[in-house]
Amino acid sequence: MELTALKADLIKATQITQNVISNQAALPILSNLLLEAKNDIIKIITTDLDIGISYSFKADIINDGVITIPAKKFSDIIKELPNEEVRIIVKKNNIVEVRSANAYFKLMGIAKEEFPKLPTFVNKEFVTISQSRLKKMLEMSFFAISRDETRYVLNGVLIELKENHIKTVATDGRRLALIETRGNFPQKINKKIIIPSKTAQELMRNLNQEGEARIIFSENQACFEFDNIILTTRLIEGEFPEYNKVIPKEIKGKIKINKSNLFKAIKRVALFTNPDSVAIKLDITKDKIVLSKRTPDLGEARDEVEVRFEGKEMSIGFNPNYLIDILKVIDEDEIEVEVVDPQKPAVIRRTGKFVFIVLPMQLT
């Protein structure tokens, strides 16, 4: 194999693909990237056996070929090369030469036969959605994923397609995020898949603000195609909880509040929390919310925010970080918060767009 490529293209390819590689790869070959050169196209592939990602770009291919190269070392070399064309030549015994201007490197590669093959998706069901919308939906739900490995089915994001609607849902049992949008799918399709958190992270990192993404479905795998990237992933098996059963019915008496003012007040009061005393107190009245936190041996914080509220006055406790996570991802200036009882969850929703639920905490 022999080829010439631009340094910028090689850097982009390694940046996109390298994050998939595990720092504790079970097999040495999984620390390598596969470089395939054919028909003036270079394809770089990495995998950890659960997720695989490939990125393709044009280059001057002198001789076709395939080789696997230590990914981190190859990436480090490319970054340090002069800003000129890079020449890559594969010699006998899988020796890879990398040249640019006066710089020369020799790497020991591994034959392609040991590299796992990524699954193929031919004649499978698929839908198309704008990259920006899918990226935003994942960003708005990702924070609610459970980190508890004993609840494996909650360690990812549910993507549900039904009757021209697409939803992303995540929950850790103490909070829930549901994001919804209408699709314009070529066929009516009913699908539920749970993508692992690592897959969601890679999608959020690589999806762009323009263009479309295709989601292709297989029995226990899925594929996301966009731009020059193909990302394949194993799916989390199991039944995602019936989230609709835990979403309270919408109420009329909502707290109307400026999102930015609430966000800043929560952050200020949260400064006085610690691991042993997390909950902050919200005293809700007709025209304001008083936020407070008293911590032994530290002191006390207090702030208040103007609101419009016609419901029952109450005091309720929340983990401030859970509220902050929700407020961070909402773009709207004014939000409506539903609270009916200090023992029942708070709900922030916009019909047809999102529902966020957070459980209260006991005040001590």
Image (tube, rainbow, N blue to C red):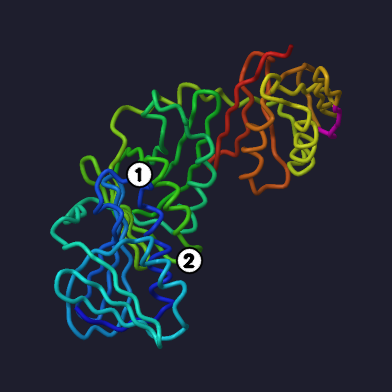
Crowd rating for badge 1 (residues with CA inside 10 Å; few <14, some 14–19, many 20+): few
| Residue plotted at (49% across, 58% down) | 132
Q: Nearer the viewer, residue 305 or 3?
A: 3
Amino acid type indicated by mark 1? Gln
Q: Is residue 359 above or below residue 72?
A: above
Most foreground residue, 299 or 283: 299
Question: Callout 1: helix, strand or loop?
Answer: loop
Looking at this view, is 283 or 9 the one in front? 9
Q: Is residue 302 magenta?
A: yes
Kindly state the secondary structure of the residue where label 2 is placed: loop
Q: Which residue is mark 1?
A: 24
The answer to whether residue 128 shows anywhere in this view is: yes
The residue to which callout 2 is attached is 210
Whether residue 273 appears in magenta in the rendering, the answer is no
Residues rendered magenta in the picture: 301-307
Residue ID at (25%, 73%): 96
Q: Quadrant of residue 19?
A: bottom left
* Residue occupying the point 52% across, 34% down: 144
